[in-house]
Amino acid sequence: MNLTELSFKEVKDLTEKYIIDTYNRYPIGFRYGVGETLFDLNDKPYIDFQCGISVTNLGHGEADIIETLRNQADKLFHTSNLYYSEQQAKLAETIINHSFPGKVFFCNSGTEANEAAFKLMRKHAHQSSINDPVILALKGSFHGRTTSSMSMTGQKSIREGFGDLVPGVHFVTENDEDSLVDAFEQYGDRIAGIIMEPILGEGGIHPLSVSFVETARKLTHETGALLIFDEIQTGMGRTGKMFCFEHFGFAPDAFTLAKALGSGFPIGALIVSDEHSTILGRGDHGSTFGGNHLACAIAYETFRVIQSRDILTNVETTAEYCIQRLQSIGQKNKLIKDIRGRGLHIGVELTIPSRQVAEKCLINGLVINATANTVLRIMPPINITQEKMEEGLDILEKTLEEFK
Ligand SMILES: Cc1ncc(COP(=O)(O)O)c(C=O)c1O
């Protein structure tokens, strides 16, 4: 069966018949993409302000990524972690060169990267003879859908319906330093680590304040707990730096990556500083697919492309334009309540449910994400041109007008 010959209705019918209904899908499917533009099954074009939820950061059909994929596919897809891998070794060196001295564990997704982070914190506690460790996480956080990632996810809607999750996770309020200090007073040396997204993404694009993160760094240094950043959504240039923690001027003990690391090819990673890089040792963790030849070759090329072009500067300039434009739209249209974010990771809080606006945007030719009930999330390719950014914002402005 050639899927490209199916109509949208046929695709929808097959999906409803054969795929477990875990997703609230928009009534559309895409066939191909070129740069910042996606084309649906009827060849209608859309500006992509979503990047597959911060994944295709370099847009669609990026020639160097495709060439790398083809070359590596010609040679070797997969051999397993029973053997050494040139692609893995080169990618690990690149990630470390862009972050801090340390080591990398490879897996296939964001939730798996956080699963590895969870095990790192638990093993760290075990090695320090802490029998009842506590892991701190943030109330509005999202870290994934496996049981331990879910256990570290504060959002109730994600946790509900599965009974007791992994015990020992305590939630503190984001950007509330008192809540953080209270937790350290309450649990002290029992705290194995704290995990946080530098910008809470699924929670509605809430950037953490520098002082909150600094307090977390200070307290974790004092107690020996691990400070871990989940950079799954903010990493790979999205905020104007390769990794968002660079804005803070200090490093965490570990961080997790996935999404844009593989430009759309599944890969995840846990990066651990040298000091803590032996906590997980032989046999402590593993993955059949983790860091396979194809994924690592593409991720390595993703770094090379971001680095070799002026992409991080482009994030700054297009983000500045985007914020100014949103502010001017907001002056005319009172549906906009707040605009926040960093780089091209921008949230627009509305006074009405954002899903209905995102649905109308699709009709008008813009793919945009709705999150946290009332927030529109703007995450275009980080190499988007000014022209396409303008085009997308024109559509958004026009669509918001329709709701006035
Ligand atoms: C911050 C963050 N962490 C973890 C995840 C989970 O990643 P994945 O869906 O690849 O398992 C996501 C996904 O949206 C995320 O935004």
Image (tube, rainbow, N blue to C red):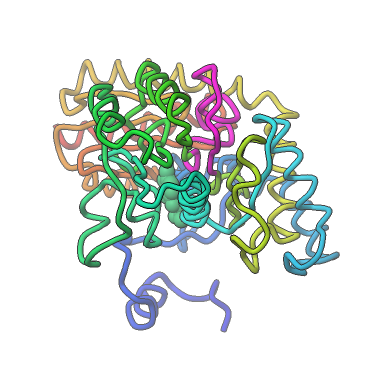
Above or below 94: residue 278? below
User: Residue 324 lies in magenta, yes or no?
Assistant: no
User: Of residues 279 and 93, which is closer to you in this image?
Assistant: 279
Q: Position of residue 237 (x, y in %)?
A: 57, 31
Q: Quadrant of the N terminus?
A: bottom right
Q: Is residue 44 visible?
A: no
Drawn side of residue 198 relative to residue 16, left or right? right
**Position of residue 266 in the picture relative to residue 175 (left or right):** right
| Residue sitting at x 62%, y 65% | 287
The secondary structure that most of the magenta stretch takes on is loop
| Residue pictured at 60% horizontal, 29% vertical | 242
- Is 328 displayed left or right of 296 in the figure? left
Q: Which residues are magenta?
A: 231-256
Counting from the top left corner in percent of width and height, residue 299 is at 68, 47
Query: How many numbered markers are drawn?
Result: 0
Q: Residue 322 location, x and y as percent?
A: 42, 22
Outermost residue toward the front? Answer: 129
Q: Is residue 384 above or below residue 125?
A: above
* Front residue of this view, candidates 282 and 108: 282
Indicate the quadrant where residue 255 lies. Answer: top right
Closer to the camera, 318 or 7? 318
**Percent of width and height locating residue 17:** 34, 83
**Residue located at (32% from left, 54% from top):** 151
Quarter of the figure with the C terminus: top left
Write the residue at 36% across / 16% down: 211
Is residue 246 highlighted in magenta?
Answer: yes
Relative to 99, residue 277 above or below: below
Q: Is residue 272 visible?
A: yes
Depth check: give the residue in front, 105 or 53: 105
